[in-house]
Image (cartoon, rainbow, N blue to C red):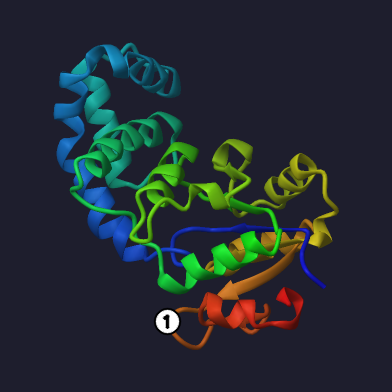
Amino acid sequence: MKPAAIVTDIEGTTSSIAFVHDVLFPYSRARLAGFVKAHSREVAPILDAVRAETGEPLDEQGCIARLIEWHDADRKIGPLKQLQGLIWAEGYAQRHFTGHVYADAAEGLRRWHAAGIPLYVYSSGSVAAQKLLFGWSDHGDLTPLFAGHFDTGIGAKREAGSYAAIAATLRLPPADILFLSDTPEELAAAREAGLAVTLLARDGDPETTAYPAVSNFDALVQMDSMA
């Protein structure tokens, strides 16, 4: 039976982990301080959010230092994610890079969309960053394929309540939603909430046999449930 909706992770699922960690993160890290200083009015709300997060009356340089600290620790914190999104937007617009999406993922997403299956993204990256990656992808603008996006604003990816909240937002029984991820802990949380799950094991044999697993989207679209 076809799922009523598919929710997909990004890193390691539709896109290479290396693209995020070897391209996007170094790009925003190298430009973070300069971007804040050059766009003081635009980033003022972000710096206010940094102060609220820390509970400290930080000046601009103090906010920059804290943002860099969070960046280096890969913290999933709202103001950092917002700032990264602004920096990456410049990078995409200036064609410094395009968003990596596996060819099989782009084709699979297009096939599911054509089959009338609503598609959603759930990633720890902000919704704005998700739209940039898919909007400026190696395979063109893929954003029209998606019916919606979720980030950690709906909850942490390793907590069952986040997936229950997604199902409630979509107004669908959890069992009718298929969640795709390369991370067993995320799949465990989604399954606990009642979602159907599949593991993307792009590097070969999966670390666990607890979940249905495929090596790419080509194998997934050939499954009976996708027919």
- Determine the residue positioned at 45% across, 43% down: 131
Q: Residue at x 33, y 18 (%)?
A: 47
The residue that label 1 is drawn on is: 203
- x then y, percent, for residue 11: 44, 60
Residue 99, picture quadrant: bottom left
Q: Amino acid at mark 1?
A: Asp
Residue nearest the viewer, comparing 29 with 141:
141
Instruction: Report the quarter where the N terminus lies.
Output: bottom right
Q: Which sits in the foreground, 20 or 111?
A: 111
Residue at x 37% of width, y 22% of height: 50
Q: Secondary structure under badge 1?
A: loop
Residue 13 can be seen, yes or no? no
Residue 22, above or below 208: above
> Residue 113 is drawn in which quadrant?
bottom right
Q: Quadrant of the C terminus?
A: bottom right
- Is residue 225 in view from this perspective? yes
Residue 222: x and y in percent read 64, 83
Taking the view exactly as shown, the residue that stands out farthest to the bottom is 205
Query: Within 10 angstroms of label 1, few (less than 14), some, or many (20 or more) residues?
Result: few
| In the depicted structure, whether residue 53 falls above or below residue 17 | above
Coordinates of residue 83 in the picture (x, y in percent): 33, 31
